Amino acid sequence: MSTSLRIGTQAGVLFFMLTTAVFAHADAASVTGGFISGFLHPLFGWDHVAAMFAVGLWGVFLGRPAIWLLPVVFPLVMAFGGVLGLAGVPIPAIETGIALSSVVLGLLIALAVKAPLWVAALIVGAFAIFHGHAHGTELPDAANPLAYSAGFVIATGLLHLAGIIFGELARLPYGQVAVRVGGALIALAGVGFLFGWP
């Protein structure tokens, strides 16, 4: 087993253990605020999960330094979008922007688009504003904004990590096909989100 695949597998086990522990101790419907609420929020929105997974996946596809840069750009810009949402700054078509993030990122992966790093960062950052704004405006009244924000940023990072782990399949025989099919499925899910599914 290659070193990168072994590290990816270990990270996947860690991700599974962390999320299992969180779900065992918190009912998303009953948690009203704070770190756990922020952590669970992205995990219960398939539109967020798909896009954040896609960021990590596209990063692997683009290679270094994108594999690490894109999963850093997204949460940083998402936090900025969250501040805009908390402040009540209006941004039109938030849900459309979130759905389009899955469509566009999925297609970029499916079509094997090797964008320059600055273009990739710009695309990821633009979509991160929509995701962050949604998180900010959906902040529960009882929540501690700092703890809530820390929770959703960490959950976002773990979703990026999941995409990176899946992207490691590209190193295996026929792995690039699996990754591109994954991108196509993300894009297809994004089309579903545009039409209100689920």
Image (cartoon, rainbow, N blue to C red):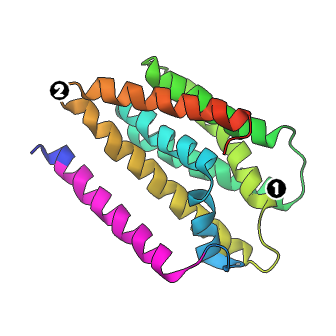
Residue indicated by mark 1 = 85
Residues rendered magenta in the picture: 6-27
Q: Nearer the viewer, mark 2 or mark 1?
A: 2
Residue at horizontal 23 percent and vertical 59 percent from the top: 10
Secondary structure beneath dot 1 equals: helix
Does residue 62 appear anywhere in the picture? no
Foreground pick, 158 / 64: 158
Residue indicated by mark 2 = 173
Instruction: Judge from the rendering whether residue 21 lies leftward or rightward of residue 98; answer left or right.
Output: left
Residue 116 sits above or below residue 160 on the image: above
Secondary structure beneath dot 2 equals: loop
The image quarter containing residue 92 is: top right
Residue 74 sits above or below residue 144 on the image: above
Instruction: Judge from the rendering whether residue 101 lies leftward or rightward of residue 172; answer left or right.
Output: right
> Cβ–Cβ below 8 Å for labels 2 and 1?
no
x then y, percent, for residue 174: 22, 24
The image quarter containing residue 170 is: top left
